[in-house]
Amino acid sequence: MNAASVPQRPTQTLSLKQVLLCGAAIVTLSMGIRHGFGLWLAPITMDRGWTRETFAFALAIQNLAWGLAGPLAGMLADRFGAFRVLLVGGVLYAAGLVLMALATSGLAFTGSAGLLLGMAQSGTTYAIVYGVIARQVDPAKRSWAMGVAAAAGSFGQFLMVPVESWLIGGFGWQNALFVLGCAALLILPLAWGLREPPAGPHTGHRQSIGSALREAFAYPSFRLLMAGYFVCGFQVVFIGVHMPSYLKDQGLGPEVATTALALIGLFNVFGTYAAGTLGQRVPKRHILSAIYALRSVAIVIFLALPLTPASVYVFSAVMGVLWLSTVPPTNAIVAQIFGVQYMSMLGGFVFLSHQIGSFMGVWLGGKLYDSTGSYDVVWWIAVALGVFAALINVPVRETAIVRPALKPA
């Protein structure tokens, strides 16, 4: 029995329009809010008298908590439906933002901005939404639909960065976080649109959770995807969090950093949509290898050229095209290999590797800056990792795994 023959959960499906609209809106909020966290580094550390490492460590914990909670959130979404997980995630998101504003010690800031928001993001971002897409959208349109959802998250990044910068400038960094906490609560009504129909009677076979995990981790292509996603997390979170401070250190104004982050979000709309669409036509492993290789090339050119606002904007646009364009092909490969019964859970484990990379990227950025006074070493680590990821995605196999006969449910 291959992966495609495993029966799927719902007997009725949600409309494609409903899934895409609600899923895209949720990802827009959840990813859009977090994309601008780098804008808070300078005002919070200056106001609280903290080092950059204190802020960076909290966001590193956020990424690690997001990754560690991701498989559990995905498992619950696969078992009980995404709706309940999204409700809890939305409440945690709002609470985390409010407590982040109120934290007066490094430990409290790590607990709110790090642990709480990380857990919230595990229940409100791609793994959960993609699980619904995988179950509800025809396989012929699956990669495209994932690209649409990822593009929505990218648009959220483009939209929210200038909004967050305006909120900080107009109302102060604490009030800005209170406003975003209220915005996060919009995830709750949107979650209703992803409330999947009850499962009907199963006429075939179903795989157990333990069997699914053993199968996935024993499969070489799954491990290669996880290794590549580690690199993705390292690169994008290091750049997203530390580039505003890097540009400030080089004498560029805060408006350059705001525009740069906004450009990343804007061009990521095109990159993620293109990656999802291309995934219907060309091998997805080739798409992933090209993305990682081009990231390394872009960073090398950025470091080699004189730093000006124009060079920053060009670099941001190029990186934006490559930013989250790894997400649709990676998740589509997981669904293609293993089927969709445990899509959210397996996607959560792949994303755990991404978040371990994110932890290393954001924490090392702060740690090495405080010890060397420069981000240069971390930039070159990001280059080397991009080459590594480009190579290891080449042998990934995308065909459905062949399974022995499973016991009846």
Image: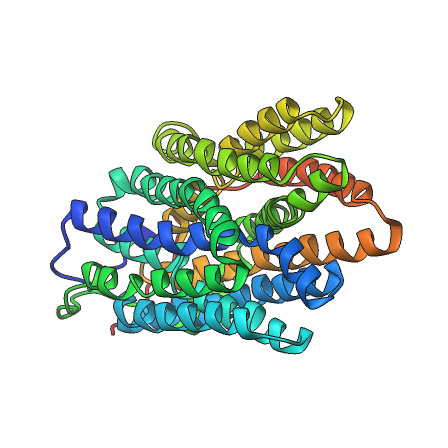
Give residue 324's position: percent from left, percent from top.
Answer: 49, 41
User: Residue 51 occupies which quadrant of the picture?
Assistant: bottom right
Give residue 398's position: percent from left, percent from top.
Answer: 44, 41
In this rendering, the answer to whether 13 lies above or below 112 is above
In this rendering, the answer to whether 218 lies above or below 285 is below
Does residue 2 show up? no
Q: Nearer the viewer, residue 6 or 311?
A: 311
Q: Is residue 207 left or right of residue 388?
A: left
The residue positioned 70% from the left and 27% from the top of the image is: 302
In this rendering, the answer to whether 141 lies above or below 223 is above
Give residue 168's position: percent from left, percent from top.
Answer: 51, 53
Does residue 384 show up? yes
Q: Nearer the viewer, residue 188 or 350?
A: 188
The residue positioned 66% from the left and 42% from the top of the image is: 243
User: Residue 115 occupies which quadrant of the picture?
Assistant: bottom right
Instruction: List the single residue furthest toward the front.
Output: 170
Q: In the rendered view, how is the structure colored? A: rainbow
Name the quarter where the C terminus is drawn.
bottom left
Q: Is residue 394 left or right of residue 361?
A: left
Name the quarter where the N terminus is drawn.
bottom left
Instruction: Please state the total of marks drawn on the protein image.
Output: 0
Q: Is residue 298 left or right of residue 277?
A: right
User: Residue 347 occupies which quadrant of the picture?
Assistant: bottom left
Give residue 219's position: percent from left, percent from top.
Answer: 53, 55
The residue positioned 14% from the left and 55% from the top of the image is: 13
The residue positioned 63% from the left and 75% from the top of the image is: 104
